[in-house]
Image (cartoon, helix red, strand yellow):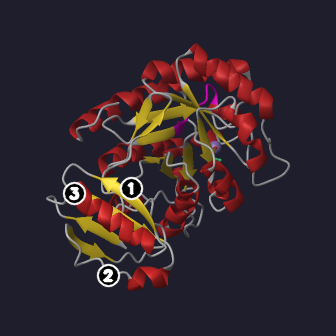
Amino acid sequence: MIIVMKPSATKEDIDKVIAKVKQNGLDINLSKGAETTIVGVIGNKKKIANLQMNMMRGVEKTVRITEKYKLVSRNFHPEDTVVDVDGVKIGGKDIVVMAGPCSVESEKQLDTAAEAVAKAGAKFLRGGAFKPRTSPYDFQGLAEDGLKMMRKSADKFGLKVVTEIVDKDDIDLIGAYADLFQVGARNMQNFQMLKALGKQQKPVLLKRGLSATISEWLNAAEYIVSGGNSNVILCERGIRTYETFTRNTLDLSAVAAVKELSHLPIIVDPSHGTGRWQMVAPMSRAAIAAGCDGLIIEVHPHPESALSDGDQSLTPKKFGQIMEELRKIAEVMGRKI
Ligand code: PEP
Ligand code: MN
């Protein structure tokens, strides 16, 4: 349930409402907007159902919330959340672009990619050192050596590091090199890892699971936020459908849905979303027009010899051209790259 306070409600009114909620054995989540204050009520369903708040001074109305997720819900927190990743703000006016290879392969590969994407306006270097591969015989990543290379290349070209975590026991190791933890599609419901990421403060990029509904995805985000870490960014990366021409079906309607349902920022991954480099530009343009807060794009100096996801990787030159186009779309949307 949320309790919407009147714009004229005083601090004393709000304090009394909070006290009553707490006396009933429930918790609160306070959201103070420019005009209205919203008191979110969290806890036992029965206790919430018995709570009578409408007659209290300063209360405009109470609204019953049917979704299980609360802290990530826009009902609880109407204003957009802006996540600050070591000075780079995601969810505000800027469209933040993250780019780089699927997997970290070598220092040279990474430096070439990092230099190009930084020059084109990306703010983050992406790259996997721990790769969740469908086949155990495929390249599994360079582990800590790869993380070291990521940090070095990113620092050299003024970029932040986003990289995937596949095991909760690697939080300290990866956290020592990365600015943003990426939880991949295959781990969206790795609840032990989500809980562990909720107990630390480094921001988390939570990709949508291969077959996850929007509600399941937001509940996964709730695991992290309810643990105490509100620095969560969502990422639409395509879902599995009957279509085979594309690797996944990029659900751009999820951007609009998430904006309606949640206050968390959302970025789009057109590389995994389509699996085809030819479709990365049009889907990136569409994603910005749909209202996303950023993009994560695979870029490889030599896509034809990439150890993973070459078919969906852009050359540095192509990436540079796309960024020019995206700047114009962003401007039309009142945003900036
Ligand atoms: C990746 O970003 O390289 C990746 C494995 O993505 P996803 O989890 O979306 O498949
Ligand atoms: Mn990939």
Badge 2: few (under 14), some or many (20 or more) residues near its Cα, within 10 Å?
Answer: few
The magenta stretch is: 297-302
Task: Give the mark, 3 or 2, whose residue is nearer the N terminus.
Answer: 3
Instruction: Report the front residue among 263 and 118.
Output: 263
Task: Give the mark, 1 or 2, whose residue is nearer the N terminus.
Answer: 2
Q: Where's ligand 2: which quadrant?
A: top right
Element marked by disc 2: loop
The answer to which image quadrant residue 28 occupies is bottom left
Q: Is residue 91 above or below residue 255?
A: above
Q: Please give the residue where the numbered disc 1 appears in the rendered image.
A: 255
Q: In this view, which residue lies farthest toward the right?
A: 137
Q: Is residue 81 above or below residue 28?
A: above
Identify the residue at image location x=46%, y=47%: 268
Badge 1: few (under 14), some or many (20 or more) residues near its Cα, within 10 Å?
Answer: many
Give amino acid for label 1. Val
Question: In the picture provided, is 223 more to the left or to the right than 142?
Answer: left
Q: Please give the residue where the numbered disc 3 appears in the rendered image.
A: 36
Is the magenta region chiefly helix, strand or loop? loop
Element marked by disc 3: loop
Identify the residue at image location x=49%, y=49%: 230
Q: Please give the residue where the numbered disc 2 appears in the rendered image.
A: 52
Identify the residue at image location x=39%, y=71%: 21
Task: Give the mark, 1 or 3, whose residue is nearer the N terminus.
Answer: 3
